[in-house]
Structures are given as C-alpha cells and as structure tokens.
Image (cartoon, rainbow, N blue to C red):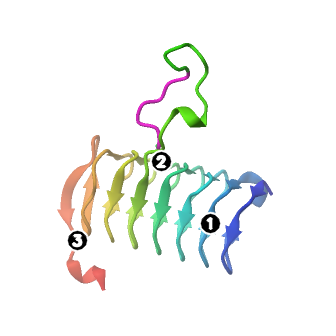
Amino acid sequence: MPLKNVKLGIEVVIHNPDLVNLYGCEIGDRSKIGAFVEIQKNVIVGKDCKISSHSFLCEGAKIGNGVFIGHGVMFINDLHPRATNPDGSLQNEEDWEVAHSEIQDGASIGTGALIMGNVIVGRNAMIGAGAVVTKNVSPNKIVAGVPARVIRNLPSKIDS
C-alpha cells in the first residue's frame, strides 16, 4: 500500500489499498477511499467522507465532514502552471504558490467535476457531474456547467 506519512482515523476503509497513492495527508474517522485515488501532502479529509475511485486531491485541499466526492473528480492547485521559469530553469516546489480549496461539511461533488484552486464550496452544496468550479459556491446551492453556475437552491433545513 503506497501510504507515506499518512494519519488515518479510526475505521477508515481504503478499497484496493495497493491501488491508491496517499502521502502526507490526514484522513478522518470512518471515511472511505476508492481505488486509484491520489491524495497529496497537507490535504485534510474530514470524518465520514466518501472519495470515489480515480479522484485526485492535490496539496491545498481541505475537505470537511460528511463530504461525497464522485468518481474522477480533480482538484487543481496551480493557477499558472509552467514547466520552466523565465530564465529557462525547470520549476520546482519553491517556484509556485499553492492555490487552496475548501469543501465544507455535507457538500457533494459529482463525477468528473474540476475544482479550481482558491474556491470554497459551501456547506451542503452540490456540484453537478462534469462541472468546472471556478468561483465560490454558496451553501445549499446546486451548481452545474462549464463554468459552474447556480441552477437551484436546496432547502436550508438541510443545514441542521
């Protein structure tokens, strides 16, 4: 199992542990991780989360409690990706700034969605399959599309 410097809570389930890549991250109690998932350093996943197969959570992501992440969801933490610096030297970790993203408690992210850096997905919000989230999503909203936009409100009683 490719786990390196990972803090696992109690009753965490990792499906096909030989087919995941987790390093330098923290996974909360009772969370479930699917096959072919990569979770990078400094990512915090809350309690009671489900992260479906083929998803990628890059450095700078913070996942609240009770969050669902569908198959093939990608988090993006580099807003200006480049292979080289202006002087032609190859970039390394010191040459870029991590763009953070936060998924708040109870949110759901549909299959194949892209979560850009520097966004917050609010409590109990729902992201449609294939959406590209480029801006903050307010709590109790359903967003979909490219770029993602509000298509419906959820009842606020879901917040309790």
Circle 1 Cα neighbour tier, 10 Å, few/some/many (<14 / 14–19 / ≥20): many
**SS majority, magenta:** loop
C-alpha gap between disc 1 and disc 3: 30 Å
Can residue 69 be seen at all in this image of the molecule? no
Can you give x and y, in whole percent of width and height, for residue 58 in the image?
55, 48
Q: Which residue is mark 2?
A: 75
Q: Which residues are magenta?
A: 77-83
Element carrying mark 3: loop
Vertical side of 157 occupied by 134: above or below: above
C-alpha gap between disc 3 and disc 2: 24 Å
Q: Which residue is mark 3?
A: 154
Relative placement, left or right, of 6 versus 155 is right
Can you give x and y, in whole percent of width and height, for residue 45 in the image?
54, 66
Question: Looking at the image, do the residues carrying marks 3 and 2 touch, with CB atoms under 8 Å apart?
Answer: no
Relative placement, left or right, of 18 versus 105 is right
Vertical side of 145 occupied by 139: above or below: below
In the picture, the disc for residue 26 is 1
User: Residue at 26% across / 61% down in the picture?
Assistant: 142
Q: Residue furthest bottom?
A: 160
Determine if the magenta segment contains residue 79.
yes
Circle 3 Cα neighbour tier, 10 Å, few/some/many (<14 / 14–19 / ≥20): some
Type of amino acid at the residue the image marks with label 1: Glu
Counting residues from the N terminus, which is met first, the one under dot 1 or under dot 3? Answer: 1
Type of amino acid at the residue the image marks with label 2: Phe
Element carrying mark 1: strand
Determine if the magenta segment contains residue 57.
no
Between 82 and 50, the one nearer to me in the picture: 82
Of labels 1 and 3, the one closer to you: 1
Between 127 and 64, the one nearer to me in the picture: 64
Relative placement, left or right, of 73 versus 131 is right
